Image: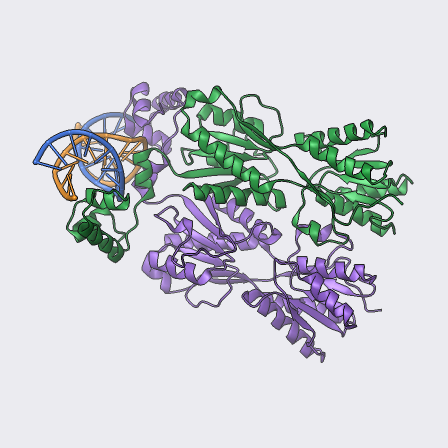
Chain colours: A green, B purple, C orange, D blue
Amino acid sequence: MKANIFDVAKKSGLSTVTVSRVLNNAPTVREKNRQKVLEAIKELNYSPSSAARTLKHGRTGVIGLTLTALNDSVFDGVVKSVFDHSQRSGYFLAISIASEASDDTGEASNFLFQEDRVDGIIVLSSLEEERYISELKKKRIPFVVVDSHQEHVYVPTVNVNNYRGGYEATKHLISLGHTDIAHISGQDTFLSASERRKGFTDAMTQAGLSPAKIAVGSFGIHCGYDIMKQWIASGQTPTAVFAADDVIALGAMRALMEAKFRVPEDVSVIGYDDQLFADEVYPKLTTMRQPVEELGEHAVQILLEQMSEPQDAQHKRTTKILLEPKLVVRESTSFKR
Amino acid sequence: MKANIFDVAKKSGLSTVTVSRVLNNAPTVREKNRQKVLEAIKELNYSPSSAARTLKHGRTGVIGLTLTALNDSVFDGVVKSVFDHSQRSGYFLAISIASEASDDTGEASNFLFQEDRVDGIIVLSSLEEERYISELKKKRIPFVVVDSHQEHVYVPTVNVNNYRGGYEATKHLISLGHTDIAHISGQDTFLSASERRKGFTDAMTQAGLSPAKIAVGSFGIHCGYDIMKQWIASGQTPTAVFAADDVIALGAMRALMEAKFRVPEDVSVIGYDDQLFADEVYPKLTTMRQPVEELGEHAVQILLEQMSEPQDAQHKRTTKILLEPKLVVRESTSFKR
DNA sequence: TTGAAAGCGCTAACAC
DNA sequence: GTGTTAGCGCTTTCAA
């Protein structure tokens, strides 16, 4: 049914070797023969078998990407960026989306790690980071961790400076004259959450302010509303809030607006991530933007380096990239009245 | 370096065939030998080569998914669902994210279609639908189109009833007593946009209302704000708006709130898609939810059917699935005052 | 400039 | 229950 390289060879009156040379753009093929081959290929609608090539070369040409949640501007952006840069280097992208709930069998490994499906893996903000890392190391699969949640010494990582993000977000509010500033944090499972919180605390302390009003919520789950509502109910409404992500910020704003507070006239709110909706909601959200494109670019680049290096060299030096977030001022923050 | 099946055979003192049998859970292996093999596998940290298997079997175990945009609750949800169901059937998922801008070379085909990388392809809401379909047919790669933008007779598709969605959304507003209802539509490139608009028009007409107030915006681009602002400026503010998607709805609400209209007291707004933020924004967005999980499930199911059927049978019957959207009433719509 | 032969790692068919 | 053999489709020597 499907044509193989022999069919092409026969049809073109040449050998499989010559066909192979044409396929790989070898210069040592007579132009006339090259044409014959190309014609046969077209007529037979032939395309080479990637499996056979892979088997021969020992590389699959596939990069794997594991992630936990989609539906988040940051992760989505990274995926897109990773895809673009992979393609540019001739690699396909296979993805694996872990469910929130960890698999029952503690042993169960990621789908992508099976067999030698991929030449390397990008671990994006995984909840099973530890397990993945040790398994990847054991299997000697080259990898890089993006948005890591723990500190690993010998692991190549690409991260965004969350401490700096928290610090800058808070400083923005302070610079607007606010002194009663609250922080709704993400859960401690994430290094990013505690880093942002540390940035908040330091910025407050350095300004001689009390960093006492902190509530620990959770990314992903819509907690901003509840926490803010509680503060309002207890008469503790701050004049400014630093929310650990944009969704939390949205929830906080909703609680405020429901209670007839105006944003930003009565209370300023700053988010984190610069999700797509940040630009379209009322009032437009001030937020910290993550360098999404660069995250993906560095991830692919480092992974390719890992893949090209001999296995044992991978312990010699470990690349760690730290990118900076960027403050995007919109409408949800203003001078304290 | 990397162990192969021979190494395992040697180490366990058995033949490669026996090792292969163990790998494939063949029942005809003496328990004692099975243990020997398993031990050797573990010691050598062996994992079989997918390439060799693929070559032998003529199938890759990979499903391809092409999509245009990420960062959209609907698409993201479908991707997740497709991943889950693929995995459940033992397939890996490779994705290809097309850039908005079509490739310069009109010829350039999708990355995934190259060689025989995948056993089948899910085309998700592609802007290059026509081109993909004809190429996939030519290459005889089994496929299914999800959220198709044109009507194709012999193409298996999974769609959501957009006409019904538009109709129901509009009826919801009518049932609340509104008569001056506007519609901000998506661009006509998308069948979904014109279908929703048709639903709007029919619902209005059937209720004896004029479906005249229609503006054609564009999905993805933030147009809801501009269009609504224009209506407000020209004194044509409707009492209810049906936005073709949630982002447009968000923009429309922003324009309204900026102009001191209250939502829903002065103007009701209904969106479409039930993006994640719909539940967190103020006021919570009433919207039409797409059956995301089912979309992915049916897509995979139909694709697997296509893959198992002989090539020539694929013209005999063509599966077409049409799912129904669901109205989710929240806070952005209310009775006309 | 071209081709014959060997082999990448695995498994199905056929012995034993 | 187990092993021998052949071959999946391609590319890489090596020889012509």
Q: Is residue A317 above or below residue A8?
A: above
Q: In terms of image quadrants, where is residue A234? A: top right
Residue A59 seen in the figure: yes
Quarter the C terminus of chain A occupies:
top right
Residue A190 seen in the figure: no
Most distant residue in the front direction: A175
- Is A59 situated left or right of B295 in this image? left
Q: Nearer the viewer, residue A227 or A154?
A: A154
Q: In terms of image quadrants, where is residue A311? A: top left
- Is A59 situated left or right of B174 in this image? left
- Where is residue A332? Give x, y as percent: 78, 48
The residue lying at 48 percent from left, 20 percent from top is A315
The residue lying at 45 percent from left, 38 percent from top is A63
Q: Nearer the viewer, residue A160 or B119?
A: A160
Total number of numbered labels?
Answer: 0
The residue lying at 29 percent from left, 27 percent from top is B16
Q: Nearer the viewer, residue A106 or B110?
A: B110
- Where is residue B255? Give x, y as percent: 76, 61
- Where is residue B136? Give x, y as percent: 38, 57
Most distant residue in the right direction: A235
The residue lying at 79 percent from left, 34 percent from top is A215
- Is B80 situated left or right of C12 in this image? right
- Where is residue B122? Give x, y as percent: 46, 53
Q: Is residue B76 above or below residue B28?
A: below
Q: Is residue B87 above or below residue B196?
A: above
Q: Is residue D8 above or below residue B271?
A: above
Q: Nearer the viewer, residue A43 or B41?
A: A43
